[in-house]
Amino acid sequence: MFDKEEKREAVRDRYAEIAQEAAASDCSAECGCGEAPLDKSVVSVMLGYEQDDLENTPDEANMGLGCGNPLAIAALKDGETVLDLGSGGGFDCFLARRQVGETGYVIGVDMTPDMIRLARDNAKKSGFDNLEFRLGEIEHLPVADGCVDVLISNCVINLSPDKEQVFKEAFRVLRPGGRLSVSDVVATAEIPQHIVDDLKMISSCIGGAEQVKVIHSMLENAGFNDIRMTPKDNSDQIVGAWAPGYSIEKYIASYIIEAVKQ
């Protein structure tokens, strides 16, 4: 029903609005990948973050967005270079920066100028100089070939109208031996057409979810090995509140997706 640019624009508009609310310190009561008003601290703990994570990052960086915690399984090491796809206000980037230390480097990429502005403001306040945010689409990453050790993302790839291209780009920017550690929403059953054709549902991390087996094939086609796709134990709790009345937990689930570039 909608072409790729219409879908991309709907996503950009939604997250521009969220960024503007966060910049105005008005996001604490109306956050989440879905539509239901949720408290960002409660959501973050449900997703798998620790209270220490919330207390040691700029408050405006955490907007309660996502469907998991990719850093919980990324096993970041000192000195590594990390790339975050769809970095938003920079929450996961700030957490990654703590784990890779002063000798590491973290890059966040987001296609929404308002999000980049917010993240850069947060970085400026923090005083970190090994952290940066770049404006760009995750299908066309503004990152050089083979310069990233770990690629993370939190409930963003499902928003792309060209997921296969995203995984090809991920493979391109990773070094040999580099790894992908992503939390995302995938389809576990056929999603009703009225949801798939709803721009609001697409931009809320629901309508654009792809089937598990299709995502696995896309990763293989991009060149990845050691692919692991694991549903989160509390997936129903995470996604169930996003669209009350739609029973979307019957069709989508929060997964941890891991893969390696040999």
Image (cartoon, helix red, strand yellow):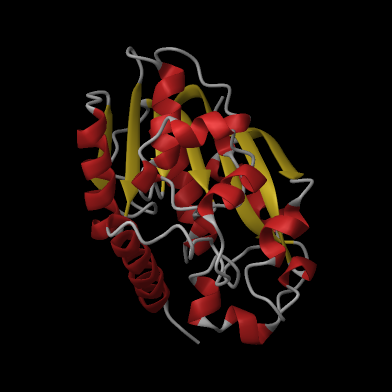
248 on left or right of 129: right
Name the quarter where the C terminus is drawn.
top right
Instruction: Give the quadrant of residue 6.
Output: bottom left
Q: Is residue 195 above or below residue 241?
A: below
The spot of residue 231 in percent (x, y) is 75, 47
Instruction: Give the quadrant of residue 105.
Output: top left
The spot of residue 139 in percent (x, y) is 39, 54
54 on left or right of 15: right
The spot of residue 234 in percent (x, y) is 76, 50
**Closest to the observer, 169 or 88:** 88
So how many labels did they put on this image?
Answer: 0
145 on left or right of 187: left
The spot of residue 243 in percent (x, y) is 64, 74
89 on left or right of 69: left
Residue visible at 79% across and 46% down in the picture = 233
Q: Is residue 61 above or below residue 239?
A: above
Residue 140 visible in the current orientation? yes
Residue visible at 54% across and 62% down in the picture = 33
Residue 172 visible in the current orientation? no
Residue visible at 33% across and 45% down in the picture = 109
Instruction: Give the quadrant of residue 2.
Output: bottom left
Q: Is residue 156 above or below residue 145?
A: below
Q: Is residue 133 above or below residue 111?
A: above
Residue visible at 33% across and 34% down in the picture = 107
